């Protein structure tokens, strides 16, 4: 069982044993075993993981074929490009319990040495329970990223409470970053958080150490609770048991516990560095954008709270929480449909309010066979295909008197409404906070964060114009009303503002916004790299050297600072320096086909013909028909 649950097991053994059968107890893990169909192995134990079944799927848009194979007990994913290029990753972890599907995590294999690298990625294929291997949802998007969908710490917040950047193999800072002038060391670690950079450099062994969700995920610090009840630590008062009594929390706060992971929206921006606190509403700490006009029938896979809020049951019952219907320690299938029907009858007069004629079959109403005698859930909770996860059916939590018939052919899309009007999700508490002075500015800033993630930069820019100019003290002074997580003191806010200004070509302002982020957190490697690129656009050679030097010293796995230095050298006409920088970048990330081709062309110009032939050959191994490569077609080639 997860290490964090062992301390609870002594006093709460039945609850823990029931929970170990829950999908959340298998939310993340390593790869254990080979062959066969996907199945759990020692549920909830880090490193025990899932069995990977061989299979393949092809992206119809670009012709890339992805094949999962098992070779000498090790699972691999190989991408076979239509032009003959190949790349390979070793499957090292899983995300998801396998109830509906399992997402796989791959660690890049160096295409020229065969060594496994410590960069991890979401696999472009997943295993659908009962159906086998299929394309992952993101691989269905235009311009699919293939093997390059980086797996970051942000991807894991709902699947583990561990901090992956604290694992031994993560891309952690290794020391102080040195400034260009004096060699003075600047801090590269924030007080509480350490950033893995590149963001996907969590380490190939990370999933052997990450724990799935345990008691702490909902209850808080279980270890402190044990210390207090055993007398090893004294609580703050006689009522302090070391963690909140969830049943004693107000209904909105109870819903917040589940909404941390079951309220996704079209865009979600975490305004806090760690998990949201209980003493502020979730919507004051995590801004979530949803369509202003939500679709009636379509729903997302992880949008339970978003949809529940549309239900008459929710609107008319302020005390309703997730546990009104769900037994949180028990999986939905184990709880059974009859249990949910009984929960309905608690509020609906023992079922006497049901006016379905006796001769009207549940299956006629619901489009699915009846699962219980009463049929409350069958008739009023629609089971259909989410728009963001094809090939499965799950529950739409928009509870209605008359549900639409289920659909199984909804065209895939990433968000509910990619271009329509959006609004911050609110269960009633946010409006009260926003009515205070400064609330309207906060709303517009929070909306801007989400709009950037949706690539709607112009709309985000319009909202950010309300804030003081970047680079001024006022820009870093909070105007948030009490009860809302400040924006202006958040490095994330200024990093996003910098990205918006970059997209608009306003590079001088972007540089100042990114400097605001680094003023608040010098360790923010992503902001420093963005500032280096902005300074590159401005022709600030000294600034590029300073930012990249700090990153090279503090994050030696990162290839991006070397790329920036190569571009800078090309602008200066120094192909010798550019070649040196690009070779270092390719040493760190050898799967860069375009990088090898660029290096080859520079080597040709420098008269290094033998080296250029090697570089061209490496580019061709990865992507034979990359534009700019010399044409060497086989006799039977295209």
Image (cartoon, grey):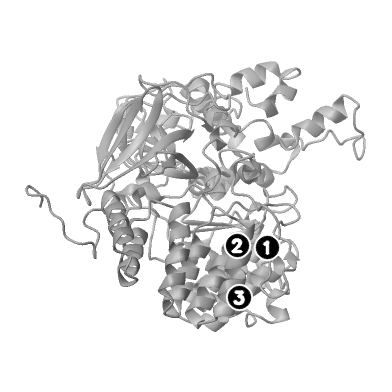
Q: Is residue 19 visible?
A: yes
Q: Are marks 2 and 1 in contact (CB under 8 Å)?
A: yes
Image mark for residue 129: none
Mark 2 to mark 3 CA distance (whole Å): 19 Å
Q: Tag 1 or tag 2, which sits nearer the N-term?
A: 1
Read off the residue under disc 1: 177
Read off the residue under disc 3: 513
Q: What element carries label 3?
A: helix
Q: Tag 3 or tag 1, which sits nearer the N-term?
A: 1
Q: What element carries label 2?
A: helix
Residues 380 and 598: in front is 598
Q: Position of residue 636 (x, y in %)?
A: 7, 47
Q: Tag 3 or tag 2, which sits nearer the N-term?
A: 3
Vertical placement of residue 264 versus 51, above or below: below
The residue under the point 72% across, 34% down is 247
Mark 2 to mark 1 CA distance (whole Å): 7 Å
Q: Which of marks 2 and 3 is in front?
A: 2
Q: In this view, does 400 lie to the left or right of 424?
A: left
Q: How crowded is mark 2: few (under 14 residues within 10 Å), some or many (20 or more)?
A: many
Vertical placement of residue 262 versus 357, above or below: below
Q: Where is residue 104 in the image (x, y as percent from the top left)?
A: 42, 36
Q: Residues within 10 Å of mark 1 (few under 14, many from 20)?
A: many
């Amino acid at each position: 069982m997860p290490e964090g649950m062992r301390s609870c097991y002594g006093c709460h053994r039945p609850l823990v044993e029931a929970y170990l059968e829950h999908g959340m107890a298998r939310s993340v893990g390593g790869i254990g075993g080979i062959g066969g169909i996907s199945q759990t192995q020692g549920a909830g134990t880090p490193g025990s993981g899932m069995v990977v079944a061989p299979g393949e799927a092809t992206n119809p848009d670009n012709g890339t074929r992805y094949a999962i194979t098992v070779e000498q007990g090790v699972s691999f994913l190989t991408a076979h490009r239509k032009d003959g290029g190949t790349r390979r990753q070793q499957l090292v972890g899983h995300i998801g319990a396998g109830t509906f599907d399992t997402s796989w995590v791959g660690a890049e294999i160096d295409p020229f040495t065969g060594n496994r690298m410590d960069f991890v990625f979401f696999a472009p294929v997943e295993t659908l329970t009962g159906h086998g291997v299929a394309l992952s949802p993101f691989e269905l998007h235009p311009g699919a990223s293939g093997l390059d969908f980086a797996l970051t710490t942000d991807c894991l917040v709902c699947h583990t409470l561990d901090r992956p950047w604290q694992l031994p193999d993560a891309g952690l800072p290794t020391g102080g970053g040195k400034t260009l002038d004096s060699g003075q060391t600047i801090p590269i670690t924030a007080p509480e958080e350490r950033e893995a950079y590149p963001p996907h450099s969590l380490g190939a062994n990370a999933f052997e150490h990450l724990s799935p969700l345990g008691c702490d995920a909902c209850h808080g610090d279980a270890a402190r609770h044990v210390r207090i009840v055993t007398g090893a630590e004294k609580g703050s008062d006689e009522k302090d048991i070391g963690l909140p009594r969830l049943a004693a929390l107000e209904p909105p706060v109870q819903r917040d516990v589940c909404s941390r992971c079951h309220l996704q929206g079209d865009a979600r921006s975490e305004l806090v560095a760690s998990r949201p606190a209980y003493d502020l509403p979730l919507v004051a700490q995590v801004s979530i954008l949803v369509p202003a006009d939500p679709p009636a029938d379509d729903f997302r896979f992880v949008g339970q709270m978003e949809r529940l809020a549309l239900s008459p049951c929710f609107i008319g019952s302020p005390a309703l929480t997730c546990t009104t219907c769900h037994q949180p320690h028990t999986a939905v299938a184990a709880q059974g449909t009859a249990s949910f029907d009984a929960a309905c009858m608690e509020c609906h007069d023992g079922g006497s309010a049901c006016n379905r004629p006796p001769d009207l079959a549940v299956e006629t109403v619901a489009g699915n066979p009846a699962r219980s005698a009463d049929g409350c859930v069958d008739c009023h909770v629609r089971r259909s295909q989410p728009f963001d996860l094809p090939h499965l059916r799950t529950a739409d939590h928009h509870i209605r008197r008359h549900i639409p018939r289920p659909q199984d052919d909804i065209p895939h899309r990433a968000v509910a409404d990619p271009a329509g009007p959006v609004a911050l999700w609110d269960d009633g508490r946010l409006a009260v906070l926003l009515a205070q002075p400064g609330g309207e500015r906060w709303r517009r800033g929070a909306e801007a964060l989400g709009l950037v993630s949706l690539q709607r930069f112009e709309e985000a820019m319009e909202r950010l114009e309300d804030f003081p100019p970047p680079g001024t003290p006022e820009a870093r002074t909070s105007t948030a009303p009490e009860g809302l997580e400040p924006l202006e003191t958040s490095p994330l806010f200024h990093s996003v503002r910098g990205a918006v200004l970059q997209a608009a070509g306003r590079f001088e302002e972007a540089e100042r916004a990114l400097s605001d982020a680094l003023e608040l957190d010098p360790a923010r490697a992503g902001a420093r790299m963005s500032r280096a690129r902005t300074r590159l656009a401005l022709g600030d050679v000294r600034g590029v050297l300073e930012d990249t030097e700090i990153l090279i010293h503090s994050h030696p796995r990162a290839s991006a600072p070397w790329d920036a230095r190569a571009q800078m050298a090309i602008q200066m006409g120094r192909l010798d320096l550019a070649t040196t920088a690009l070779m270092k970048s390719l040493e760190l990330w050898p799967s860069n086909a375009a990088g090898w081709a660029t290096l080859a062309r520079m080597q040709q110009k420098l008269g290094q013909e033998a080296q250029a032939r090697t570089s061209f050959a490496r580019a061709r191994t990865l992507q034979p028909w990359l534009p700019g490569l010399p044409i060497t077609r086989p006799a039977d080639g295209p």
